[in-house]
Image (spheres, rainbow, N blue to C red):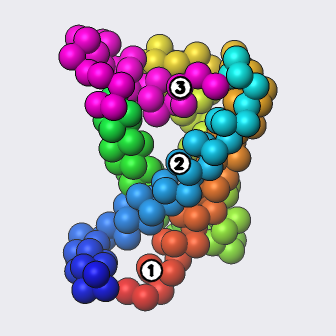
Amino acid sequence: MQQFFKSILSIARKYDALGTVAGIIATLPMTMFMLLMQRILPEWQRYALPPERITTELATRAKVAQQMDKPQRIGTALVSHFGYGGNMGALYVPFARKVALPPPLKGAIYGLLVWVGNYLGLLPALKISEAAPQQPLRRNVMMIAAHLIWGTTLGITEDVLERSA
């Protein structure tokens, strides 16, 4: 198993993709946090989390939602969420190189920027989801905290990978 991870890091270094790897890794605690917090929200706020809602909306637009059952939709949402986390991790690297702050703080700021860009910008603009102000406060707090977890983990992980390169 250790050899497997060494191979992944070697490939990531070769293609300058350490941010992508860090973003994928950071998506795991973020996702776990979201799933745990969803359980303690008031019952009327326990509807599908954003990755599933986005996947369902895009599958509907692509006219494939009718062929997807719930496990397929959730599986697709997870793969998409980790892929998006990896892509945002790749975009973190140029940001990290320009900002002179400790990696956890730099990552947390970046996580908040990703939340703002998506939940106040991209998703409403593409009519995939309503803007954050139209969501219940507790759902917004959950998602902001999830992005802080993601960003902090991203910052630390990318720094460790970069220094071990």
Q: Secondary structure beneath disc 3? A: loop
User: Which residue is painted at 39% across and 49% down in the image?
Assistant: 82
Place of residue 149 in the rendered image (x, y in percent of width and height, measured from the top left): 64, 56
* Front-most of residues 114 and 42: 42
Magenta segment: 46-72
Q: Quadrant of the C terminus?
A: bottom left
Query: What residue would you read off at disc 3?
Result: 48
Which residue type does callout 1 highlight?
A: Glu
**Left or right of residue 64: residue 35:** right
Q: Magenta stretch: residue 20 in it?
A: no
Spot occupied by residue 127 in the image (x, y as percentages of width and height): 47, 14
Q: Marks 3 and 1: in contact by CB < 8 Å? A: no
Q: Quadrant of residue 25?
A: bottom left
Of residue 94 and residue 154, the one placed in the foreground of this image is 154
Identify the image quadrant of the N terminus.
bottom left
Instruction: Count every numbered label the image shows and give the total.
Output: 3
Compared to 111, does 44 lie above or below?
above
Instruction: Please say if 6 is above or below 71.
Output: below
Q: Residue at x 58, y 22 (%)?
A: 47
The mark lying in front, picked from 1 and 3, is 3
Crowdedness of circle 3 by 10 Å Cα count: few (<14), some, many (20+)?
few
Q: Which mark is residue 162?
A: 1
Residue 130: x and y in percent read 58, 16
Residue 72 location, x and y as percent? Answer: 29, 31
Look at 31% across and 35% down and name the residue there: 76
Nearer to us of marks 2 and 1 is 2
Report which residue position mark 2 lands on: 31
Q: Are marks 2 and 1 in contact (CB under 8 Å)?
A: no
- Residue at 70 percent of width and 17 percent of height: 44
Given the image, on which type of amino acid does mark 2 rest?
Thr
On the question of residue 98 being in view, the answer is no
